[in-house]
Amino acid sequence: MGEEGTEGTVYLLCLAASSGVPLFCRSSRGGAPARQQLPFSVIGSLNGVHMFGQNLEVQLSSARTEDTTVVLVVGLEELTNIRNVERLKKELRASYHLIDSFLGDSELIGDLTQCVDCVVPPEGSLLQEALSGFAEAAGTAFGSLVVSGRVVAATESWWRLGTPEAVLLPWLVGSLPPQAARDYPVYLPHGSPTVPHRLLTLTLLPGLELCLLCGPRPPLSQLDPQLLDRWWQPVLEPLRACVPLGPRALPAGFPLHMDILGLLLLHLELKRCLFTVEPSGDQEPSPEQRRRLLRSFYTLATATHFPPEPGSPEEKVEDAAQRTQVPRACYLVSGPEEPGTGWRLVALQSGPRRLLLLLSAQSPIHAMRGLATHTLHALTPLL
């Protein structure tokens, strides 16, 4: 697989490792899907780079020029031992919407944090009870409510899904075009990489979907309107309150300081997160810029200041020995530090929670940690 950026266009190219036959090519320009294709000469060159490195028993991870970056990624064994290229190309089309959403300017952040994007519904306990009852009546332990690719509520078994499927399943649902019902085959990268499960989705309200993960049963026809009405009609108003939660993540009227332009709250043990750039939406920067700023700051803070969680596979012995010396907060000023200029970003870690805030230029630097501490305290009951 390869990725190339030229004049703002990003290409994702997947080649058969043995033959160099192109399996698919997707492109994105300015954060939106594009229809541009790589010339055959470029595809041939990418394959030549791959084969040259392979013959020398060298794995090439990236190559750069002034305006181009080529990245090679090793795929699953099933994608390297291809028996029927044309059949595989046809099967891969089911993934195009998901792939395009990763290339574009997504409103989600689970791809970076490996935490499930969530929202906080105003009456979560009622929705949780209805979801658990419906899933049991349908004969599966795996159920969730998803709005715009974010999880509103889920059964205990759904939350126990491993990474990355817990992140990918709602993301997939959010990337697909609207449809009243679906019976969608999915492979679980961690739990079942070779045997497909069925992802059943039912649209309860525009943008709000009920998702069930199951085996051969139940058939989609078994989820009839009478069964749906029995469990969901009594909670119709709480369901309606969930529809606008997608980009906002937080309940309407939740008090946030006026200087907050965006926030990312992660629960590192539960692997869930809240991400929004909706506060003070009439101010600069734009929502797209806010998302980019918070994503970049998350990458910087995680790589530089905050250690892996205790017991995680990334933690080394020396990291565990030095954990008492690591910071619990950091901040960054993007642009000049003069009052009223530049964006402020602050990160704070407390126990299993990590909070990142994007603040307006008017926010005083000396007050950022206090503001972050107060905001984290207010958000803690939600996640």
Image (tube, grey):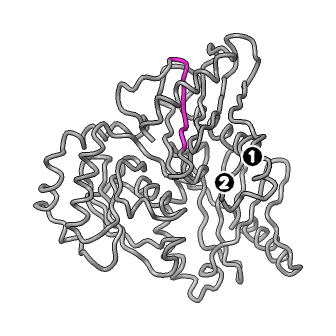
Q: Which residue is nearer to you in this view: 61 or 215? A: 215
Screen quadrant of the N terminus:
bottom right
Q: Are marks 2 and 1 in contact (CB under 8 Å)?
A: yes
Q: Tell me if residue 254 comes above or below residue 65 in the rendering.
A: above
Residue 310 at x, y percent in the picture: 66, 54
- The amino acid on which the numbered mark 2 sits, given as a three-letter code, is Pro
Earlier in the chain: of badge 2 and badge 1, it is 2
Which residue lies at the image location 66% right of the left edge and 41% below the top edge? 298
Q: Quadrant of the C terminus?
A: top left
| Secondary structure, magenta segment, majority class | strand
Q: What label does residue 310 carry, if any?
A: 2
What residue is shown at x 53% (from left), y 31% (from top)?
376
Magenta span includes 139: no
Residue 83 or residue 159, whichever sits in front? 159
- Label 2 element class: loop
Q: In the figure, residue 229 lies in which quadrant? A: bottom left
**Quarter of the image where one finds residue 182:** bottom left
Q: Which mark is residue 73?
A: none
**Label 1, residues with CA under 10 Å away: few <14, some 14-19, many ≥20:** some
The residue under label 1 is which amino acid type?
A: Arg
* Position of 165 relative to 299 (above/below): below
Classify residue 199 as left or right of residue 361.
left
Circle on res. 323: 1
Q: Residue at x 50, y 19 (%)?
A: 257
Secondary structure found at label 1: helix
Is residue 263 found inside the magenta-colored segment of the image?
A: yes
Around disc 2, counting alpha carbons within 10 Å, would you say few (fewer than 14), some (14 to 19), or many (20 or more)?
few
Residue range in magenta is 258-266
